[in-house]
Amino acid sequence: MKKNIIIILAVIICAVLIKFVTSSVSNYFQLKAKSQRPAPNVVVEEVQSIDIKRTFEAPGRVISKYQVGVVARIAGYLQKSYFKEGDDVKKGEPLFLIEPDEYRNVANSSAANVKNIKAQLEYAEKQLTRASELVKMDYIAKSRYDEVLANRDSLRAQLSSAQAQSADANRNLSYTTVRSPIDGRIGMITVTVGNYVSPTSGNITTINSNNPIYVTFPMTAEDFESLQASDSVNHKQRKTEILFQNGDRYKLTGVQDFHDNKVDEVTGTVTMRATFENPDGALIHGEFVNVKLYANNPSKMPIVHQTAVLENQAGKYVYKLDEKGIPQLTYIKTEGQNGDNWIVKSGVQIGDKIVTDGLQKVTPGAPINAVSKEEMAEIKKKTLSAQQEKKKAWFSFTKKDNDENGEN
């Protein structure tokens, strides 16, 4: 039994060794054949440049310039609402009425107290005038004059206090009519008529301003640096466009007029902001849009002809020559087209050498034979002619063979 197992193991090991040796020999001959194969003819050109105003795209969000929560500044029952949810309101327009009777009574009482003290003060002023004349002629004692003077001063102080109380009462009375602090659109009402409200009740509703309106969007630190470099002097009021989620373009253009002063540590982006006019209220606070930002000044960008660019699942790529003149597969990022050329964002630089013709024959890391466009055209012409001759000979041989078979 043990002898059989040993024999089986020996056979398996021999089979593995034979397969390994066969594979190694096959790879050796393949590599030898490749090394002996002549380098393919290709056209190599330098990456050119174009002056273009760059554009940057990013997802954005519509944000109201002002977002104000409307709260009750006094306590009482909500008696009336002057608007409906979703209405547009102007600054100073009445929104709600909180029962005013109690506050009106306090205001009227305070006003009456002010009038009463004023009357007493007028009398005290007259008394003081008489006393000042009499004390000069020694008709009254100096102590009596001092009493009249003190009474007048006391009434003056009482009047100031009463006027302050009256002003406070009128202020509270004005709070019974809740007015809009800004121009904007009313949101949902959280407290309906008939409910008791107070300063601790929270927002009764929220008003979002809608004209003008902001759109905020992120920009990568790399793109931000490129934008700042191209617009180093003229770096304000950049043209901005937005598209809705359904692909429709908003009819008005905006201006990018602000950017944050830091790069977000988590996302590696800088928050940008554009301002748009919104006269029809088409842009709504919180809405998601797609933003397209235009640089103010043109900058030089690498361009690559479309025929020099291939694509696979990982993205677009070209064959760029390294320092030894060997082509290497290099992935590129593009940001639009200019005629028949791709505008390159990253991957190759102006002046880099890339393969522009004969790409199908290139093997990354393998030598090439660089020829001119004219030489490549001649090579293609000869290759095509040879193929045509070969095809003609094949058809001639086939016809002759058919004729001979027919005679037999």
Image (tube, grey):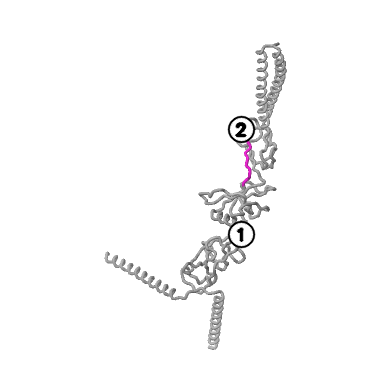
Residue 130: percent from left, percent from top: 72, 15
Residue displayed at 56% across by 48% down: 261
Give coordinates of residue 204: x percent, y percent.
63, 36
Q: Nearer the viewer, residue 376 or 247?
A: 376
Q: Residues within 10 Å of mark 2 (few under 14, many from 20)?
A: few
Please state which of residues 402 and 95 is positioned toward the viewer in this rendering: 95
Check the image and report above or below for 160 versus 185: above
In this rendering, does residue 216 appear at all? no
Where are the magenta residues, as a range? 63-71
Does residue 110 appear anywhere in the picture? yes
For residue 298, the mark is 1
Q: Quadrant of the N terminus?
A: bottom left
The residue to which callout 2 is attached is 199
Q: Amino acid at mark 1?
A: Pro
Residue in the image at 54% along x and 53% along y: 221
The kind of residue tagged 2 is: Pro
Q: Quadrant of residue 389?
A: bottom right
In the image, taking residue 371 as reference, residue 245 lies left or right, namely right
Q: Is most of the magenta stretch helix, strand or loop?
A: strand
